[in-house]
Image (cartoon, rainbow, N blue to C red):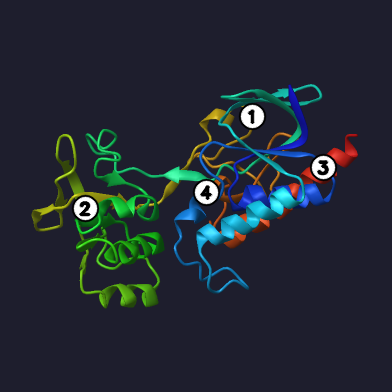
Amino acid sequence: MNKCDILIVGAGAAGMTSAIYALRAKKSVIIAEKVAPGGQILSTTKLENYPGLPNTTGEQFTKNLREQVEYFGGKIISAEVLEILHEADGFRVKTDDEDIFASAVIIANGSRERKLGLPHEDELISRGVSYCATCDGSLYKDKAVAVYGGGNTAVYSAMYLAGICSKVYWIFRKPEPRAEKHLVEKAKAIDNLEIVPGNVVKELIGDDSLTGILLESNDDSKTISVDGIFVTIGREPDNGRFEGLVELDAEGYIKSNESCTTSTPGVYCAGDTRAKHLHQLVTATADGAVAANMAIDYLNQHK
């Protein structure tokens, strides 16, 4: 069975930052990532609010982080963590590939895309329904698409898609979007991007593939013909598998304090998986540093 000092769940910004700090303290580290290193930041085409990096991309930021992890000898494995069992002398981490024994654990699995919750949504994934514009946008070259959501991710997605697609409808539920005003102004200046405020997506139209969406406002309903919809209505935690290990709040986030400790000694959390007021890249990396240092102290005290 593979062994390490610290097992990190998730190779996003929080997880890889944790790894860098732990590796520099001469701890052995394995990061288990079920999809691809980078996490949510990979879908950011232009990163503007990370201190000291005013003009980079999520992809480049991820590449730099991964290179740092590997430089210090960290190991990223492609595996999904299914369960973590607290044993007398550490933690048995069960993955879909192998069991790993770790003396401490940092949970940095981020969050997952929130779905619309509409009939046939799952069946239409990759057939017109997507949650990542940079991942799937090229599939809709010269086609009409919709972006649903009012935050920064939505407006970034809409502007990105406007450079690929013939028409982009940016739809959000409230009269005004939550996105930063300077981004909204940029979106308004794009000819093939139409802003549709005050509407909710009520139905996905199409059998084998998406052909349109039904929108509903306070006083009207209408159908828009589109080949794809990019859903950007936020994210939610994926912590059900850890419910018996650490305490979760009512929304499923891991309860912790600013030291990133959990209800179980030896288990720490970092990034979007943690209950906190601000979920941003800069707070994810900060959490990663804190969680790693707490884990390092724990290991040193329990040699």
Type of amino acid at the residue the image marks with label 3: Lys
The residue shown at (30%, 40%) is: 126
Front-lying residue, 161 or 196: 161
The residue shown at (51%, 56%) is: 41
Q: Earlier in the sequence, mark 4 or mark 2?
A: 4
- Secondary structure under badge 3? loop
Name the quadrant containing residue 282.
Answer: bottom right
* Number of residue marks: 4
- Secondary structure under badge 4? helix
* Residue under pointer 4: 39
- Secondary structure under badge 1? loop
Q: Nearer the viewer, mark 1 or mark 3?
A: 3
Q: Nearer the viewer, mark 3 or mark 2?
A: 3
Q: Say the numbered circle drawn on residue 27.
A: 3
Q: Earlier in the sequence, mark 3 or mark 4?
A: 3
Front-lying residue, 111 or 200: 111
* Residue under pointer 1: 245
The residue shown at (39%, 51%) is: 135
| Disc 1 residue crowd, few under 14, some 14–19, many 20+, Cα 10 Å | some
